[in-house]
Amino acid sequence: MAETIEESLRSMVEQVDEELYEVVVVDGGSTDGSRDILRELEAEFDNLRAVLDRSDECDWLGGDRNISFEESRGEYVLESLDTDDYYHEGVIEDFVEIFHALEAQVDRPFFLSGRGMNIAPRGLLLDVPYYDVGGAEDRDHWRRLYARDALIWLDHGHVSDSLGYDFDLRGEISRDIHGKITDFQSGVSFWSAIRWTLHHEHHYIFERPRSLPREVLKRLYDLATFPYAYLKSLPLERHEAPAEFQRKGALEARIAATRMTLPEMEAHYGFQVDCDEFSEAGRKAFCEYADT
């Protein structure tokens, strides 16, 4: 991450009010020079704080996120902002404004999930931390948040650009298999995964429909990789999923049924934000996305 971390962090810290926001960066034990860059940025920005002394406490992404929740001093936490992404000017504060407008209409703590940007009260994140379930801890986290009626999903356009961390085919397959392993660690039953493979329309969230030949290939691929992932999951720590999510496809169906664009969310919850006050990037990502 050394080649992207400075540009990424500058895109975050330089667009927010330093009196209202702190940027907490947890180093998970990097050896590529990232720690030196973090020290330099910490000296330059009063509201950037690098956590460099807790890398021996965990060696997984969700654990680093949990540490960031513990270290944060604010009432709310923006999380899952990646240091290999460049964030468009203004989108962070625009996203926060949407959250607080929605918060005024919702009578419970909730996690607002977006594309590459999430926000929740710090107390909720401490109560519902990430579990160590490999490389797809988000899926497990969503299940437990949904079970508490504490997840609201905002569908919107891109708020960032990748700084070079793109998956090739091997990376995509690895990520997919990690997701399958996580499903089984989280209590999804093996046979529900097989039934889902055979009978479900294979369109994941934000995924385009496939042609019939590609659909057949995808089903054959899943029939091969689900058993492999199940066997890989057996010696790993298990976390019982809420009963409603122990069937493969239940999470995907819940997300598809509940995610809303900003105009849909405003109509559903009875609030309105002033898009004219948003940044240009924020208007495009949040306000105009439904029209694209």
Image: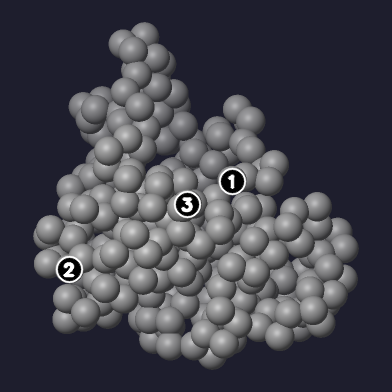
Q: Where in the figure is residue 231, as x and y percent of width and height?
A: 48, 43
Q: Is residue 204 above or below residue 224?
A: below
Callout 1: few (<14), some (14-19), or many (20+) C-alpha neighbours within 10 Å? few
Read off the residue under disc 3.
281
Which is more N-terminal, label 2 or label 1? 1
Task: State the residue at coordinates (47%, 52%).
Answer: 281
Q: Amino acid at mark 2?
A: Phe
Q: Is residue 61 above or below residue 66?
A: above
Read off the residue under disc 2.
271
Q: Amino acid at mark 1?
A: Asp
Task: State the residue at coordinates (37%, 32%).
Answer: 207
Residues tagged 1 and 3 counted as in contact (Cβ below 8 A): no
Q: Where in the figure is residue 163, as x and y percent of width and height?
A: 68, 46
Q: Nearer the viewer, residue 256 or 145?
A: 256
Q: Is residue 49 above or below residue 14?
A: below
* Colouring of the image: one colour
Secondary structure at badge 3 equals: helix
The answer to whether residue 147 is left or right of residue 93 is left
Q: Amino acid at mark 3?
A: Ala
Distance from disc 1 to disc 3, alpha carbons, whole Å, reads 12 Å
Dot in front, 1 or 2: 2
Read off the residue under disc 1.
161
Quadrant in the picture for the N terminus: bottom right
Q: Where in the figure is residue 175, as x and y percent of width and height?
A: 54, 42
